[in-house]
Image: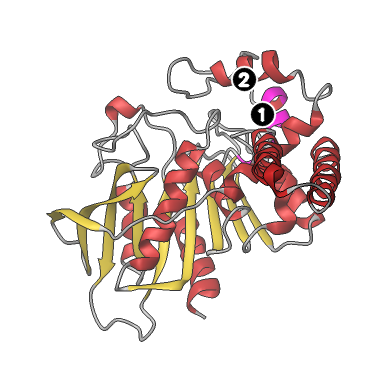
């Protein structure tokens, strides 16, 4: 941050000097001065790493109208369909559920649903997380579950959730797209994420003010420095990181390019959503099992403390002996999640 602040101050002084000079030189040099200002601005933009939260905040997420690609068999009290929307020019597919019954005056509240890591080649829109989406859909919520780029029929390359902002960008465009949907209440949008989807949820909520509340199960929700040192299996070997080509590749390449966190804390802090919790768009509810062998339950404990230190609302539920999917306590976890969203999106 100090480095970026220094660059901004220097750039401001230079631009000010150039503008001053512009008032004291012939008009024939005006175009040259404009080119110089554009070059300085371009240099500033280039200094922001593409993975940083600042880069996410500078992005534009227009989304698009949702296009129904395929009607699916209805749920108990809601309709289901595969839809598509646009993200950075890519056609992204998603599962959409809409409650039956009398729509509220302002539209149905929404939950944008961020799934965890599934091998892109094995991913199917209508598979996995069926009980999860059904729980929210049956309780009066529109649910939109993005396939992310490179998953299922979605266009683009599956870039991984940690070495690129691609999946987060797809989710932010999903938020913009559901805001355009005729049956949705654009002011009542929540976000649910599991595992890698929790990482995406946290990044989305420190970027966009549209998400009013978030629920994260077994989330990868610590800072990048903590990911380097605390994400280990019980055997002591590094936990695999899903990326486009080589799991763990982002970690190696980042260290080689930017140095270890203690050497270059500015970079590592700039890409960590945890650095920006003071700007988070709403309260969080966290769930984690102590027998989770994929993501340490301490990750949720760390985020809870950071949220408290940032004076933000947070709830944490730890389930002794439960796994990554919170299988043994699924019912109570879903009940708590629904009640949390009801409190913050329906009340």
Per the image, the residue denoted by label 1 is 227
Q: Which is the main secondary structure of the residues drawn in magenta?
A: helix
Quadrant including the N terminus: top right
Picture residue at 80% right of the left edge, 25% below the top: 264
Magenta run includes residue 228: yes
* Residue 316 drawn at (x, y percent): 65, 54
Q: State whether residue 326 appears in this view.
A: no
Q: Seen in the image, is 106 located left or right of residue 226?
A: left
- Toward which corner of the image does residue 111 lie, by quadrant? bottom left
Per the image, the residue denoted by label 2 is 251
Q: Seen in the image, is 313 located left or right of residue 157?
A: right
Residue furthest to the bottom in view is 105
- Toward which corner of the image does residue 128 lie, by quadrant? top left
Secondary structure at numbered mark 2 = helix
Picture residue at 48% right of the left edge, 77% below the top: 346
Q: Is residue 101 above or below residue 329?
A: below
Q: Are marks 1 and 2 in contact (CB under 8 Å)?
A: yes
Instruction: Give the magenta part as a residue range.
Output: 221-229
């Amino acid at each position: 941050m100090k480095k970026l602040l220094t660059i901004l101050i220097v750039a401001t002084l230079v631009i000010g000097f150039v503008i001053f000079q512009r008032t004291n030189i012939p008009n024939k040099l005006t175009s040259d001065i404009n080119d110089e200002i554009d070059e300085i601005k371009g240099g500033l933009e280039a200094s922001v790493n593409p993975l940083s939260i600042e880069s996410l905040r500078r992005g534009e997420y227009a989304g698009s109208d949702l296009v129904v690609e395929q009607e699916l068999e209805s749920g108990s009290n809601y309709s289901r369909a595969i839809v598509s929307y646009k993200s950075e020019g890519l056609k992204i597919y998603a599962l959409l559920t809409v409650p039956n019954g009398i729509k509220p005056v302002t539209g149905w509240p929404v939950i944008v649903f961020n799934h965890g890591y599934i091998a892109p080649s094995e991913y199917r829109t209508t598979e996995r997380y069926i009980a999860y989406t059904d729980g929210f859909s049956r309780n009066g919520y529109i649910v939109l579950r993005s396939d992310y780029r490179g998953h299922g029929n979605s266009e683009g390359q599956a870039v991984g959730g940690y070495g690129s902002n691609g999946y987060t960008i797809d989710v932010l465009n999903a938020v913009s797209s559901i805001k355009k949907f005729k049956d949705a209440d654009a002011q009542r949008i929540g976000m649910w994420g599991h595992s890698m989807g929790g990482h995406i949820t946290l990044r989305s909520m420190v970027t966009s003010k549209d998400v009013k509340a978030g629920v994260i199960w077994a989330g990868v929700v610590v800072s990048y420095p903590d990911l380097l040192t605390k994400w280990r299996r019980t055997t002591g070997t590094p936990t695999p990181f899903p990326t486009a080509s080589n799991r763990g590749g982002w970690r190696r390449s980042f260290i080689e390019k930017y140095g270890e966190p203690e050497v270059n804390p500015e970079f590592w802090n700039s890409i960590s959503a945890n650095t920006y919790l003071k700007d988070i768009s709403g309260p969080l509810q966290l769930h984690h099992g102590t027998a989770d062998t994929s993501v340490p339950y301490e990750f949720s404990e760390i985020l809870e403390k950071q949220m408290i230190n940032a004076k933000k609302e947070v709830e944490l539920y730890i389930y002794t002996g439960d796994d990554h999917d919170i299988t043994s306590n699924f019912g109570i976890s879903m009940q708590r999640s629904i009640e949390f969203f009801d409190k913050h999106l329906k009340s």
